[in-house]
Amino acid sequence: MPVTIEGLDEVIKKLDKTDPTKALYVGMDWGADEVIDEMKDYPPQTAANRPDEHGRWYERGVGTHSRNAVQRTSENLRMKWKKMRNKSAPSISITNSASYAEYVHGNRQSNVMKKIGWKKVKTVSDKKFAEITEHIMDKYFKDWRNN
């Protein structure tokens, strides 16, 4: 016995009016902000961030201190995060312009940085993937319902 579903024409019209690209970018923008917010969290300080027996230490956001001077070598890693939207394809890149970012947060992260607790961008974005996807789908269905 055949079943007839009525109203599909209206559903198809709404689908045709709904732009998935808008939902993608809204979700990806939100997701990039979430990843960047987590990347800005520094792990707990170590002994290197406190004066040693010779009066030397590294202060995050400033640089290397000695008894008589401060070398302002910090590039303010926390403040150098940016997201860039790809204009030719629906994607967003997350970058950090500090010269040493790749060694702290990237694929060239040293075991020392990992042990201290610095997170890799890839690890954080992978962890947030399902939440970002859900955000994209929520935006798409909201737009669909409003058409």
Image (tube, rainbow, N blue to C red):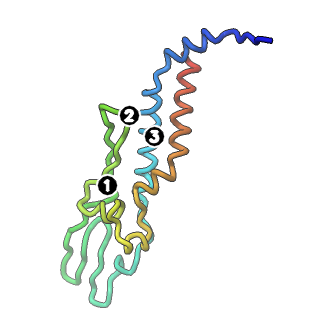
Under circle 3, the secondary element is helix
Circle number at residue 104: none
Outermost residue on the front side: it is: 1
Between marks 3 and 1, how big is the CA–CA gap?
Answer: 18 Å
Pointer 3 local density, CA inside 10 Å: few below 14, some 14–19, many at least 20: some
Q: Nearer the viewer, residue 77 or 26?
A: 26
User: What amino acid is labelled 2 in the image?
Assistant: Pro
Circle number at residue 30: 3
Residue 119 in the image: state x and y as whole percent. 43, 62
Residue 96 in the image: state x and y as whole percent. 30, 54
Asked if marks 3 and 2 touch (Cβ < 8 Å), the reply is no
Q: Mark 2 highlights which residue?
A: 90
Which quadrant would residue 112 be assigned to in this image? bottom left
Under circle 1, the secondary element is helix
Which quadrant would residue 146 be assigned to in this image? top right
Position of residue 95 in the picture relative to residue 115 (left or right): left
Tag nearer the camera, 3 or 2? 2
Circle number at residue 79: 1
Position above or below: 135 against 73: above
Asked if marks 2 and 1 touch (Cβ < 8 Å), the reply is no
Q: Nearer the viewer, residue 38 or 50?
A: 38
**Label 3 vs 2, first from the N-terminus:** 3
